[in-house]
Image (cartoon, coloured by chain):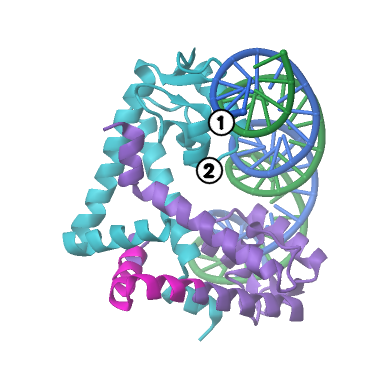
Chain colours: A purple, B cyan, C green, D blue
Amino acid sequence: MRRSERKKIDPDLGILASRTLFAFQRELFSTIANQGHSRIRPRHGAILAYLDPEGSRATDLSAQSGQHKQVIGTLVDELVELGYVERRPDPKDRRAKLIVPTELGLDQMVKADALAEQIERRHAAKVGAAEWATFKRVFQSLTT
Amino acid sequence: MRRSERKKIDPDLGILASRTLFAFQRELFSTIANQGHSRIRPRHGAILAYLDPEGSRATDLSAQSGQHKQVIGTLVDELVELGYVERRPDPKDRRAKLIVPTELGLDQMVKADALAEQIERRHAAKVGAAEWATFKRVFQSLTT
DNA sequence: CCATATAGTCACTAATCTTGACTATCAAAA
DNA sequence: TTTTGATAGTCAAGATTAGTGACTATATGG
């Protein structure tokens, strides 16, 4: 059997992960674009996916998303520009700033979370609840 | 519970996929760098992961990797430069060219495949063979 | 021979990632 | 209190990666 064929029948973890990631992003961002959030790109997910409604620090977002602090800074600039978040001084640490979602940001976050859940429910319905539970448990254990 | 905490306990599919992908790429490419292939970057995986030892067409690589033809062209240029592949006319179609791995390219492909398998075996050993089998089956079904 | 589709490349633009250095502030030891 | 080392965020620059439209050569089916 040719190598490319073997890869098609039994794709490795990297191939599966990248396909899943890109399909997920495509669906989520194209759907959410139709719900009033057409200006944001998958990129901005690094912020919005982890942001707390009460506000988060850039450093925490950096650690959670795995992006460099520099990248977080740029993305926050863009999201401020687009009206999704604002920067406020952190009362607990004068070095730090809190990234706080605006109304618009909160709306995006709620909708994105709902969409993610909906996508997962669809997969779960397709493969069965038990299999899905196993899948997610194993998946999560890989990244720890 | 804070949103960021919830995301940590029960990360969505996108978060899991991106973590898995990046961890996999990091490990594979840093290990393979120590095995004599330090010049190639994860990016080149789009070619090398799908390349047939007998040679593949740019169009097929483009379809399999999901990259634009233009990107494939650039990556092939680089891999030619680095001595991993060469372009040969396709005897079956004079418009097309076959991207054929050199000795060096074949060596990388064999090692990369072995490493991917090794990473998966490690995960399988950790979670148990049955769970791993279910995991991979469900994972694969997501992308079809 | 002709019309239409396909393989690959060129040229260009936009987006994204990575690094190193720098200022302000913190936290804790001397 | 002062010093020392770490941390938060930003600036600036460069390297890497992604996306588009147009173009040439060849193929395929009438």
- Name the residue: 28% across, 76% down: A130
The answer to which image quadrant residue B29 occupies is top left
What label does residue B72 carry, if any? 1
Pointer 1 local density, CA inside 10 Å: few below 14, some 14–19, many at least 20: many
Where is residue A107 shown, x and y percent of the image?
Answer: 69, 79
Mark 2 lies on a secondary structure that is loop
Quarter of the image with the C terminus of chain A is bottom left
* Magenta segment includes A135: yes
Instruction: Give the amino acid at mark 2.
Output: Gly
Q: Tell me, yes or no, if residue A62 can be seen here.
A: no
Pointer 2 local density, CA inside 10 Å: few below 14, some 14–19, many at least 20: few
Q: Earlier in the sequence, mark 1 or mark 2?
A: 2
Instruction: Give the amino acid at mark 1.
Output: Ile
Where is residue B96 shown, x and y percent of the image?
Answer: 53, 20
What label does residue B66 carry, if any? 2
Does residue B119 sit above or below A28 in this rendering? above
Q: Tell me, yes or no, if residue B7 can be seen here.
A: yes
